Image (cartoon, rainbow, N blue to C red):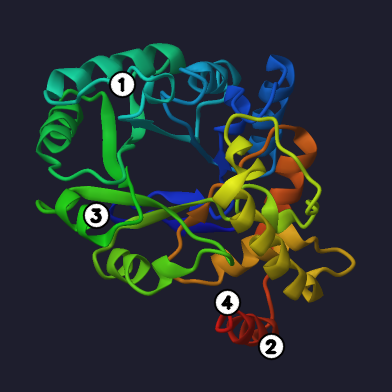
Amino acid sequence: MQYRRLGKTGWQVSTISMGCWGIGGQWGPVEEAEAIRTIHAAIDLGVNLFDTADSYGLGVSEELVGRALRGRRDGVYVATKVGNFARRVGAPLSYTTPHHVYLCCDASLGRLKLDTIDLYQCHIGDLQDPSVFLEAFERLVERGKIRAYGISTNTPAVAEAFDRAGGCAAVQLNYSLLNQSAAGDLLPWCAANDIGTLIRGPIAQGVLAGKFTPETRFDDSVRAGWNEGRGREQFVRRLEQVEQIRFLERPGRTLAQAALQWVLANPAVTCAIPGAKNVAQITANAAAADGALTPDELARLEEIAAGW
């Protein structure tokens, strides 16, 4: 495993960390025992940052992370998010007052069985006015309930507004071979301002594993929209792009591992947070940290992407 500094926090975090949305049940059922085994395996492999959210399975993901980390908290960073609880079931909080954030933070601490959250992130990517969250996060730092804070967004103006007082420690953003826009603006801005980056979607929600076909159908709640209409059109188009980069597969390296190594080739990236639902997946993900794409491979990928 390799480690990089998470911006102004100074924390050394594993370049392959673990996204915990998948164990929350919205990507299909996951047995509690397997979820816990997966997190334990991740720690054994050197993974030291786990990213979850209060909205993942309406708290189920946080609960599982909390159970898995019992007795294994030392040296592990826990990141969670606030702002989308119950949004998928049509009952979000308004977040018009810091008290909503305090309430959600206490609930997350309870589910995680922690006294302090290492990284607390605003989960509203199109946030227009960050005042409520910034006030709440600053008070939560003072009270010792969180150590650092950030935001999950791909919009540079939103990230800049969130860092208006210089307190934003990290930005979580979507970045992959199939979604490279952040390389032009948001990632360079984060690097220039000493803000750590957590990369979500580095395998494009599974597409870059190279295992889907035009006949693939999805029954999980996250990707069900890929079955029809514009979602289907985008999915099929992405499959065509994946076929253009099949040359990355070779003995000892899967396409998904190559996709992770491409993400890590950007020096503005602190860590990738691919999801994992079982031990085999986290083992394969973690192995990507110890390899790298060649300059020729990177150049060829740049040439291919220019035509997309």
Q: Secondary structure at mark 4?
A: loop
- Image coordinates for residue 19, horizontal then vertical, percent: 55, 39
Residue 278 figure quarter: top right
Of callouts 4 and 1, the N-terminal one: 1
Question: Of 203 and 196, which appears nearest the observer?
Answer: 203
The residues bearing labels 2 and 3 have C-alpha atoms spaced at a distance of 33 Å
**Residue, disc 3:** 159
Identify the disc placed on residue 282: none
Q: CA distance from mark 4 to mark 1?
A: 37 Å
Residue 64, picture quadrant? top right
Residue depth check, mark 4 versus mark 3: number of the one nearer the observer: 4
Residue 223, x across and y down, in percent: 61, 39
Residue 92, label in figure: 1
As helix, strand or loop, the secondary structure at mark 3 comes to helix
Decide: is 41 above or below 226. Answer: above
- Pick the front one: 98 or 166: 98
Rendering coords of residue 106 (x, y %): 29, 14
* Residue 296's disc number: 2
Horizontal arrangement in the rendering, residue 256 relative to residue 141 (left or right): right
Amino acid type at image mark 4: Trp
Judge whether residue 9 can be spotted in this image: no
Q: Establish if 226 lies above or below 62.
A: below
- Residue drawn at x 76%, y 34% as measured from the top left: 279
The Cα–Cα distance between marks 1 and 2, rounded to whole angstroms, is: 47 Å
Residue at (55%, 32%) from the top-left corner? 21
Image location of residue 229, percent across then percent down: 59, 47
Q: Of the residues under marks 2 and 3, which one precedes in the sequence?
A: 3
**Disc 1 element:** loop
Horizontal side of residue 170 vs 260, given as left or right:
left
